Structures are given as C-alpha cells and as structure tokens.
Image (cartoon, helix red, strand yellow):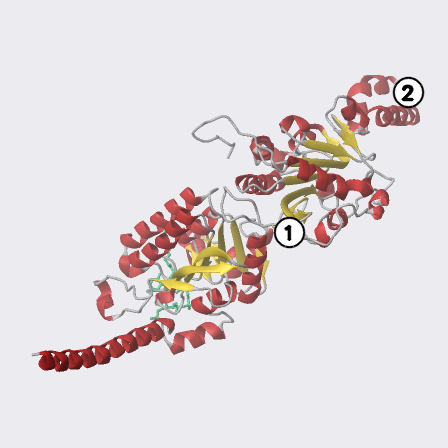
Amino acid sequence: MENRAGVGSQSNSITYMTSNRNKIKELIDKRAEARLGGGEKRIESQHNKGKFTARERIDMLLDEGSFEEFDMFVTHRTHSFGMQKNKFLSDGVVTGRGTIDGRVVFVYSQDFTIFGGSLSETFAQKICKVKDYAMKVGAPVIGVNDSGGARIQEGVRSLAGYAEIFQRNIEASGVIPQISSIMGPCAGGSVYSPALTDFIIMTEDTSYMFVTGPKVVQTVTGEVISTEDLGGANVHSTKSGVSHFLSKNDEESVLLIRKLMSYLPSNNLEDPPFMPTEDPIDRLGDRLNDIIPEDPNKPYNMYDVIHEIVDDEEFFEVQRNYSQNIIVGFARFNGRSVGLVANNPMSLAGVLDINSSRKAARFVRFCDCFNIPLVTLVDVPGFLPGSNQEYGGIIVHGAKLLFAYGEATVPKVTITLRKSYGGAHDVMSCKQLRGDINYAWPSAEIAVMGAKGAVEVLEGRAISKLDSEEEKAKYAMQKEEEYVEKFANPYQAAKYGFIDDVIEPRNTRFRIVRSLEALHNKKEQNPPKKHCNIPL
Ligand code: HXC
C-alpha cells in the first residue's frame, strides 16, 4: 500500500509539475500577447506618427521597474458588429501602479493600437479601478490620453463608462492631484475627463482636443478649419488656456509630469515633498534694489525678480503662453514648495483682465487644496477697462480671483513691488483677504487710483475753469505731483497696518523664507458648509 501510494503520489507530482510549467508558460505567453497591444503593425504605425505606445509611455514616466500592471487580461464583452471575434488583451488601456521619485502614483495609458484607444465599458471599469485605489491610499492619478473617443460598437455603455470616470474625477478633485497628458486624439465628450483634472499637458503636433471636430464644425457653422487650428496643443496653450503645459514630444511630456509631481503632495492631507537646497536663505538679491525703473510707466522683467528670490533660480511656470499679464507657477523657498503668482509689467502693463483672473484663480485654488503656500508679487495698475471686458463678464471673472484668495487658508505672503491700485489692490491677496504677511518695497504705490485719474476726478472742475491749455496742463501736473507725493507710496497703507513692513528689495528672499517658516504650522478653517458658491 505504502509503496503504491508512494509511486502514485510521485507520478501525480510529475503531472502537476508538467502542467504547472505549462500554466506558467501560458501566463508568460498571455503577458507577451497583451504587451503587443493591437499588434506589430499598429505599433509601427504609432511609432511612425512620432508617438510612443501606451506601455512605453508608462515606462518612461515611472521609476524604472516600478510599474505593476492591473487587469492585463481584461477583454471587452461586446457582441455587436462581430466584435466577439475581435478581442485584444487589456482592451485598449494599460492601467496600474508605480512610483515617481519613490512616491506611489496610479496610472492609465490609452492604447491607440487597440480599436484606436476607444473607450468600452470594460476599458472604463479599468480606469475607474485605478482611480478607486488611488483614492483609498491617497495617491495621485496620471492619465495618458490617446483615443478615438467612445467605442462606437458599445453604444450607450461607452457613454455610461465616461460618466463613471467623470464622477470619480469630481470626487477626487481636491483630494488627490489628477494630471492628464494628451498624446493623441481627445475629442467629443472624452475631453471632459482631462478638463476635470488639475493639469493638462499637450504634446505639440500629435495631440488635439475639441468637443466637435472640423467636419462637424464645417457642417454646422460653415467654418473651414484644420484639426491643429481648432484644437491643437498650441491653440490650447495660447488661446483657450485649456492646456497648462506644452511639450515637444512624448518624452518631454513625461519629464514635465515628473517635475510637476516634485512640487505636489500625494494628497490633501500631506505636505509637498521637502527638497533640501544649498541656496542660502539669507542670500541678498542686490540687483533687486535697482530693478524698478525711475519712470513708473516703464516695465521691468518680473521673471528676473522671481529667479532672484526663489531657491536655485528654479521656477516651474504653469500656462506660460496663456494670458501672460499674470505669471503663475511653482517654486521653492528653503526647500518647501510654494505657488507663486505675479503680475507681469511686460504684458498689458500687468493689468488684470478676464483671462488672467481666471488663470490665477484656478491656480490659487489648486494650491489651497493641496497645502501649498502662496507667494504673491504685486505690480498691478488695475483692471483692464472697456466694453469687451464688461460684456465678457470681468465682474464675475475678477471676483473669482478675489474669492480664491479670500477663501484660501494656506499661508499667504504678499510683496507689493510697485503699483497696487483700486480693486486690483484688494484682489491681489491684500491684508483684509486674510493675507498673512504683507510687505511692500519702497517703490510701492498703493492707492485708490493712479495720479492722473485721481486728479481728473478731484480737480476736473477747477481745471475746466482755467483759461489756457497751458495753464490747465501746468495745474494738472502740479496736482498730480502732490497726489503722488501724498498717496503713491507704501506708507499710507503701512500707517494703517495694511502693510506689515516696508522692506529693502534685496532682502526679499530672506523675508519670504522667514515668513513661510513662521507660518508653517498655520491652521485656519472656513466655516462649515456644503460647498462654496464661487462666481463661476
Ligand atoms: C471604435 C475606433 C474609434 C471609435 C477609431 N477606431 N475610433 N473604433 N470606436 N470611436 C478604430 C478605427 O476603426 C481603426 O481601426 C483604428 O481605431 C485606428 O483608427 P484610424 O481612423 O485608422 O486612425 P487615424 O487615421 O489616426 O484617425 C484617428 C481618429 C479617427 C481621428 C481618432 O479614428 C476618428 O475620427 N475616430 C472616430 C472619432 C469619433 O467620432 N469618436 C466618437 C466621438 S463621440 P482599424 O481596425 O481599421 O485599425 C464621443 C462621445 C463621448 O467620444 C461622450 C462622453 C460623454
């Protein structure tokens, strides 16, 4: 018996070993099949367009060897249009988990080689799964978009799939950073998932986004327009502001994502990563003492100011080519991330208008969601006047920025470099919008309006009574000088404590670093509510 049992069990184990080997081989084969996506030909066609495949993009994005794929063996469940005979492992989207600089992120990357990356029900479920994991553990989600949109053969199930994704985008907003990279087509309703995320990166020449394509545009409106001119990366980086970053190719896109991640926490309960720096906190910026021109109407380069004061001259600008009268982006002071907002005197004299208000408001709100302190550099002559702006709703758009600053509870340090006039003064993180530390340079002009406008209002009647044009000009000039002397300086505001101190420009870095250190443990909360009603 014993002998027979022994023999029996030996022969069984040989059978198992053989079949286990077969099973492992089957697994390896299936993995290889999945990795081939839609097949060699379609991969070649993808490469010929200057694009990488979904998996290659993930490999470039994540730390080497860190990617763990989920749902590689998923296939679609459609029977219409003979689809049951046409199945590919992974079903057109590669999903999983990996790390960037050692920190966990969740990713999905649409695979154009399988049904043009079009979205099926199972495809959507895969994306939802990584989003759900990411929310459970508080890790960012990065999505790579390269898709022909809803998978036509799946009909409404595809639309439902999109809506499931949108809902998750909405719930994750403000909880975990969400980043969308557009590396191919992104059209129809599918543009709304990237639009619901925090940042969009578009790749030049190969990516486009629009709600309706050129053919529909022509049919409905008669307008003839190319894909690139309607929704290319350049259009969305300069005209619409939909895209936050423009890259030359897929490789540059992933580098931008990695860099962006270095400024962000993994979720809304964490602080951004600390990056030690050799840059001394008390480094003087001597050239700042001479940067403001004697003529108040002459511009200067705000980027020079930014580079002079931040760690290692490193400034990571967001929406660089859109609404350039305001500058927004990330930098560090003594190793800690900040969101930097600055008026740009080189573009429209740094006025606030509809687009700059929207751009800065969204950035301020992002920083506030993710515990990133705000540093604001002010040189703003006011709001852009005119019927275009009024008809476009500058009242509500300007209010967005005002709202965003007033709502923000992160540490807020504001430096007024030169002009800070009227409503724009209030909007740009003034003391009464819970600005924590407000400094001004000696060149600051903080007043209700500029001297010319003020004299026109206050002295208009007196001027009109004068006989000659010469007398009128002389009188107006004299009154303007008096006004400048009296009001266009930082001391009126400092007198009331609206400015905490007037500082020498070259000390700006040191003063900001010390302020941020002092504010590091700031805890401030808005009153409990369902949500605010920001003027959208
Ligand atoms: C199923 C699709 C597909 C789709 C492309 N394919 N889009 N399959 N559903 N939506 C398939 C093609 O049949 C082709 O299969 C392969 O993907 C590659 O497509 P090509 O057309 O050969 O590639 P290319 O010339 O580069 O053109 C890419 C494209 C084009 C511009 C994206 O395919 C296109 O216009 N597709 C349709 C886009 C669209 O209208 N989608 C629906 C939008 S409405 P084979 O087997 O030949 O290689 C929508 C609603 C969402 O998305 C709403 C959410 C709220």
Query: Quadrant location of the N terminus?
Result: bottom left
Residue found at x 24% / y 61%: 77
* Alpha carbon separation for disc pair 2 and 1: 54 Å
Q: Say left or right for 292 vs 155.
A: right
SS for callout 1: strand
| CB under 8 Å between discs 2 and 1 | no
Please say if 35 is above or below 255. below
Mark 1, residue position: 317
Tell whether circle 2 marks a residue whose Cβ is less than 8 angstroms from ligand 1.
Answer: no
Judge the density around disc 2: few (<14), some (14-19), many (≥20) Cα neighbours within 10 Å.
few
Q: 51 or 218: which is nearer to us?
A: 51
The percent coordinates of residue 491 (x first, y second) are: 81, 26
Location of residue 16 by image quarter: bottom left
> Is residue 231 at least partly visible in the picture?
yes
SS for callout 2: loop
Q: Say which amino acid is labelled 2.
A: Asp
Residue found at x 50% / y 35%: 536
Q: Say left or right for 61 vs 482.
A: left
Tell whether circle 1 marks a residue whose Cβ is less than 8 angstroms from ligand 1.
Answer: no
The percent coordinates of residue 351 (x first, y second) are: 70, 38
The percent coordinates of residue 187 (x first, y second) are: 43, 56
Mark 2, residue position: 467
